[in-house]
Image (spheres, rainbow, N blue to C red):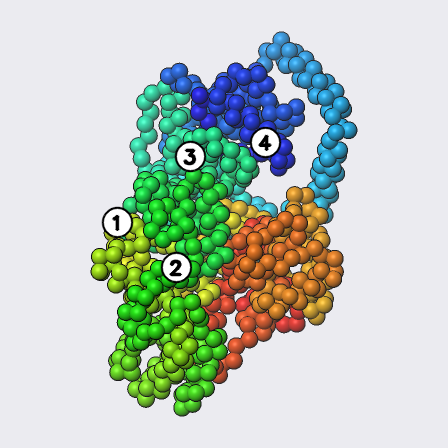
Amino acid sequence: MNSVIMSKMELPADPAVKMKALAFLDKLTKDDTLPGLHIEPIKGSADSRIRTGRVDRGYRAVLFKLTEGGAVTYVFHGVYEHDKANHLAERAVLKTNPVNGVTEVRYVEPAPLADWEKEHAEYEAMARREAEKAAAEGAQAEAPEQAEETVAAEAAESAQAEAPEQAEEAAVVGKPAEPGVPAEPLLTRHGVDAAALAQLGVDEALAARAVQARTEEELLAAAEDAEAEWQELVLIALGSGQSIDEVRREFGLDAAVDTTGTEEQRILRGLQHPAALVSYTWIEDDEELRRVVEDGDFSAWRVFLHPLQKEFVERDYNGPAKLAGGAGTGKTVVLLHRARRLAAENPEARILLTTFTRNLADALRRDLVKLDPTVPIAKQLGEPGVHVTGVDALVRAVAMKAGRDMGAATETVLGAEGYDLSDRRDAKAWSEAVDAAGGDLPAEVANETFMAAEYAMVVLPKRVRTVEEYVRVPRRGRGTALNRKQRLQVWKVIEKYRAAGRAKGALDFEEMAAVSAASAQQRAESGGGRFFDHVLVDEGQDLTPAKWQFLRAMVEPDRNDMFLAEDTHQRIYGQKVTLSHYGIESRGRSRRLTLNYRTTQQNLGWAMKVLDGGEFEDLDGEAESHTEYRSARSGPKPVVLAARSFAEELDAAADLIAKWSRQPGVKLETIAVLVRTKPTLTKVVTGLAERGVKIRAVEQESVRAGAVVGMTMHRAKGTEFSHVLLMDVRDGALPVGMRKANFSEADLDDALLRERSLLYVAATRARDVLAVSYHGEKSPLLG
């Protein structure tokens, strides 16, 4: 058996070629002498280890063959069209970086051939082209799609000619300073010079160019030309303000270089370096190989982890740990890999992987299975394996399991028993309670928004059952002060709300979470044990106090008990929460990811401007900044389209979507139209369909192929698309209309902050292209 190390290779999009590449790799691992592989050295190549192999008539694999101690390891570099494969193979060299020992592929000019070698190579190339031409002519009738591919390529060239503005937007390093552009280079402002980059192992020419860049755009343009991906990421990290020492630790560049052993041993050792693992992964078995090839995205998180992400996957914590990070930074990736790791270490472990909504939980389950189909998925409480579910579904499952034993818990939380766990409160219950008992309160207090928040943030987590308890309970973080008289009046409203629930025997979602938390805690204290050994939580910023208390009760405080991922900038539900108030102390075990893997720097920059002006706090109660988030990808600038009417906005949207859909490689289901509300979604989908757009509204169900996706911005959370159009981003629609008389100043500020976060979430769903449209007056969130 031969070992295979995969790189972030180039692979044709054609599914048939992917399957042939899989077959090629499968044979390669078993026996590289098998007929049909045609593993061949390249005459005159710069690296004697380089090989090419036959995938089919038109494509060849490029790989390096390492032989050490009788064992053969192939470093798989990519699948390319025949001539391109040979050209790359002539120039590619696999070597270790002399400064840090990281294995890299570099491109050099090949050694010159002797005259007889040139003549022989030309003869072989001519014979090969003639054979391939004859084979292609024979197969042309059976494969008319090749002609379509040629048309697509011509269309791509035509589209490129129609978009000269992209070339104009390309950053040019070293040009004269423009107005508003700092004269001092960006890295110099951060205390980094060419000598410091050289000490990290950054190429001399790349370092010289990077230290001249004055703006983030210029530095990104320089970084994108790095031949080794780790060098690109290092430059981006330094440009965002990380120190040299932080970068050394993050990429493992602070370790001494081991220069012992043969060159093959050093190369293999360098391929296991944390910085090399950004670009390479060791394939353990045939099943993993199949998943890698069929997925086709070899820069995907399912295969490659950033060194910092890998640290969070493998590190052990003596208590709850928290991972923060902006949209697209890979927090969910870490959770999935960590769940996989915990399950592999202990097959009997009961692991909870949960999040706020059912849609996100479904996505977690799908992605975990994609990551590793062998991970055991637990379907019931108490089963070994990974139990993937939404928090509300788990709350209900715990309540139903407790059954009659829930009586003591409802008494503890609500002061009464006799609730039907299968029933739910009427949506109008709070407004009816306010109408019945809130008449003497000011308007900013006597409303459903304030009362529901007061109940969820103060009454339920403090398990307040009487008016005497309520007038004494601290209301930390609520913003709106209440005197004793107002507290007495608020409690009358709460009593009305609870009385209506008792009369019906029904609990709302927050009550159910609080009661289930109390029940689980009572179960553990009576010797019944906890339901899980490890709890992993995604999108933690959207959970309420009662749900945090519930999750804390699911697992015994211990090593690796809770691992939480959050982004306060994506809080689009609920109120601000501080974990330490609910028995979850993650301070000192909190870290942040700042590198965005999904969104281009242009789209990310646009989205971050939406956050400007808002004040954000993380789950530890610490101020959270968004200014250090960065992306390793570049693309076109987002466009904002203004229209005079809704009909005109729909016309512009239909034209834009038609233009996008004609671009090579863009499938309809990779285009999304996002709006603020469900009624607006209905109007937009209907209006675009009338204009010939094949579009489908997606709510609870999954995205299906063949149609543009229409979603609300809330539903879009956790998704990503190549092209995104945000529609109806006008004044009065986003932020959604709010009557100031019905909000306290603190509640209004927080509601507006969530609207700002919602637009940020929507904008960061776009991987490549982002457009925004409105009619009338634009939203004030657009600046």
Residue 427 in the image: above or below residue 523: below
* Label located before the other in sequence (2 or 4): 4
CA gap, disc 2 and disc 4: 42 Å
Please identify the residue farthest to the top as the structure is shown.
Answer: 116
The residue under label 3 is: 276
The residue under label 2 is: 397
> Which is in the foreground here, disc 3 or disc 1?
1
Please identify the residue farthest to the left as the structure is shown.
Answer: 526
The residue under label 4 is: 19
Secondary element under disc 1, as helix, strand or loop, is loop
> Which is in the foreground here, disc 4 or disc 3?
4
Q: Is residue 652 left or right of residue 508?
A: right
CA gap, disc 1 and disc 2: 26 Å
The residue under label 1 is: 559
CA gap, disc 3 and disc 2: 44 Å
Secondary element under disc 4, as helix, strand or loop, is helix
Q: Is residue 693 left or right of residue 489?
A: right
> Which is in the foreground here, disc 1 or disc 2?
2
CA gap, disc 1 and disc 4: 43 Å
Q: Position of residue 107 (x, y in %)?
A: 52, 28
The dot on residue 612 is none
